[in-house]
Amino acid sequence: MAIREPSAPGPRPSAPPAAISAGPLAAELRGVRGVGPKRADALRERGLVTLGDALAHLPRRYLDLRRRDSIDALREGMDAVVAGRLEGLTIRARRYGRFRAASRAWLRDPAGAKLRVVWFNLPSYAEFPTNEPVLLVGRIAVAPEGGLQIVHPEVHRLAAGDAPAIRPIYALPAGVPQRLFGEVVAEALRRAPADRPGAIPAEMRKRENLLEPREALARLHLPPPATDFAALADGATDAHRALALDEMFAFQLALARDRLRSRARTGAALARRDDGAAARFLAALPFRPTSAQSKVILEIDVELAASVQMNRLLLGDVGSGKTLIAFWAALRAAESGWQAAIMAPTELLAEQHFRNFQRQAAGCGGLSALLTAGVAGAERARILRALERGDIPIVFGTHALIQRSVRLARLGLAVIDEQHRFGVFDRARLVALGAQANVLLMTATPIPRSLALTLFRNLDVSMLDEMPPGRAPIATRVLREPATDEAFAAMRAEIAQGHRVYCVAPLIEDEEDGDRASVAALAKNLGRALPGARIGTMHGRMRAADKERVMRDFRDGRLDAIAATTIIEVGIDVPEATLIAVTAAERYGLAQLHQLRGRVGRGGSPGRCFLIASANASGPALARLETLARSSSGADVAHEDLRLRGPGDLLGSRQSGALALSFAAFIRDPAIISHAADLAAEWLAHDPKLELESSAGARLAIRKLVNSGFSLGDIG
Ligand code: ADP
Ligand code: MG
């Protein structure tokens, strides 16, 4: 069955589109029928607080209940839809000792094949229609006595005309049933005013022949029976397109306005010195910069020397050597009497940069300091004083750099590494430490340059499109559940050699998958498969300090394996990590999988990657994974992703994308982005200050984007 996620699961909640975020939809979910305090809290954890949030939370996928699976074709893990008649019922209404009460039956399909059926805690015999055609909908599992069974299926009586057509399936926290959430959404739709504007003004919407936002949402939550299922599953209906275009319109409006604002800025002009610290740093490196690095250095050099403020995005594949650019630029600031601040999203990464810098550049006159939450007491006070006096030209750090107590005498350059990991306010605060600061944003988001240029019209873009020589590609294999022995055997072999292993699962704890795709379940599996191995777990909802501790233990060899969500993707370098396995791999975009596999093979030993598809992954999904197994360059992967899934995959996945966009994942055609940009330009020409009544929706949408951490636009 086609599985298409609006966006990969991630810690950051998505923003509801402006059109549905005010008025009656601002009402909290808590108190809506069926949502008590406990469920409300669980939903809040996922960023689902109001009815509007619920409306913006589109189904993760859909189940086509018009489909019929034949019993012979069932496989473990499948969500099956099987028709037949129930026979051989045994009912257990109570628990027996410690065994869970189970009612059992057989389903016989028209071809005569039989399937074991199991229910837990079935309320009454009346629920069991015997002697009439029924439809069962449920997950296929291996029965304790061998063979397959369908577990706790829904039963629909076909004779009664009680067969639904398309079932939305949501990503929900444990304890919030699908059906209940469906009712909440239906309630939200009932309360949503039909005439709330989208970001695109009504007259333009009409001309462009776009669905109203409320109608589009209704069609995605409660797909009408006539819906083209393939298009729906693939995120390619008119409703998807209308929502994506609306959101991209708001995004482009925000960028366009920002560009106008930032054009007039003057930035620190960093005088160039050919015999300065930056030049000496390059000369002293144990390797030669790649020609891509040299080209980017030149681009930045010219811009830093001028008195226009630099606002540059540096794109470069994992391992392409972005850090070197940052070090060079920092020295370039220092040698001309300015300060540079380099901010990284984790302590570990900030420390790693600081240490590498000390090793590679200390001899070049690059006096530097490290400022993280871990630096305290007298040391901290000393650093703060020196920064304020301008005695320390280069400072590395985390969020600690943007605390109130930090002042810089002359900030000429702000570098933000893994910039997509920061909220917009964090970035703005760092930049605000110096009125004339030049800004360099760095990210490994593997996004083709042409797309980056369309998207981020407010920034200049540099690209490291070449890897340092001698990198072996990560050997990548595609497996499919349950045939995963090869991956586990490889893990055991790596760990036996003192190497380390990452294992990635898409969810923290869940929900509709009955735990199968969760980090917790994965850790349990690993425990069984890797006897004696020390296994840690890590996910986005852990406290930052706990995450750092796990990463540190892993780096220093106190853990052999980590079961984690995709949060391990961020720039950390553990040379002993040689293998990464990604479960439910079909749920990710190729670009993101490529990022993940970049975590391994960074030391002397070659890296390996296992992409483990779910049992029910579709043929095309497997083929897509095979493409990744065959290609090793980020640029190839990004182009392939663009071709197969459109830019939405790059925009929509939180880990790889920089944008807090809810619906951009549905953009299949890059032309939608330029179209949105054209519409935005047209509208700005008509209403430059967005002050007309018909711009109300646009104003709301922009505000919403900014509040939710709108990416690069208002930097600078
Ligand atoms: P990323 O772009 O992912 O931040 P890094 O800057 O961490 O990549 O670089 C990855 C590794 O490549 C580092 O160990 C770095 O020292 C090395 N490296 C960078 N540039 C070169 C080069 N020109 N030649 C050889 N090795 C390089
Ligand atoms: Mg890096």
Image (cartoon, rainbow, N blue to C red):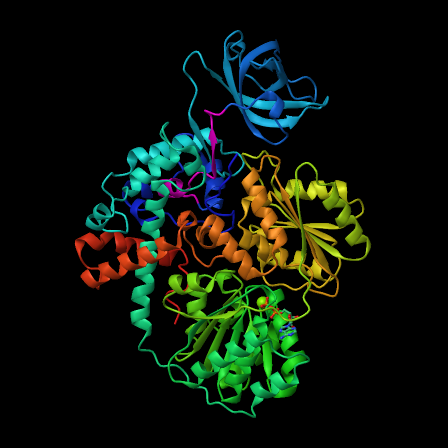
Q: Which residues are magenta?
A: 48-67
Name above or below for residue 280 compared with residue 223: below
Q: Which quadrant contains ligand 1? A: bottom right
Q: Position of residue 604 (x, y in %)?
A: 74, 65
Residue 149 % position (x, y): 64, 22
Q: Nearer the viewer, residue 669 or 490?
A: 669
Quadrant including the C terminus: bottom left
Q: Residue at x 59, y 81 (%)?
A: 368
23 vs 355, left or right, is left
Q: Position of residue 220 (x, y in %)?
A: 38, 37
Q: Which residue is painted at 61% across and 38% down in the image?
A: 614
Give the answer, above or below, for where 596 lies relative to 402.
above
Relative horizontal placement of residue 68, taking residue 220 as reference (left or right):
right
Residue 635, how many percent across, how many down? 54, 61
**Number of marks present in the image shown:** 0
Residue at 52% x, 66% y is 399
Q: Nearer the viewer, residue 650 or 95?
A: 650
* Visible residue check, residue 424: no
User: Is residue 66 a member of the stretch shown in magenta?
Assistant: yes
Q: Is residue 359 at least partly visible in the picture?
A: yes
Asked which quadrant contains residue 559, the reply is bottom right
Q: Nearer the viewer, residue 66 or 175?
A: 66
**Which quarter of the picture shows residue 573?**
bottom right
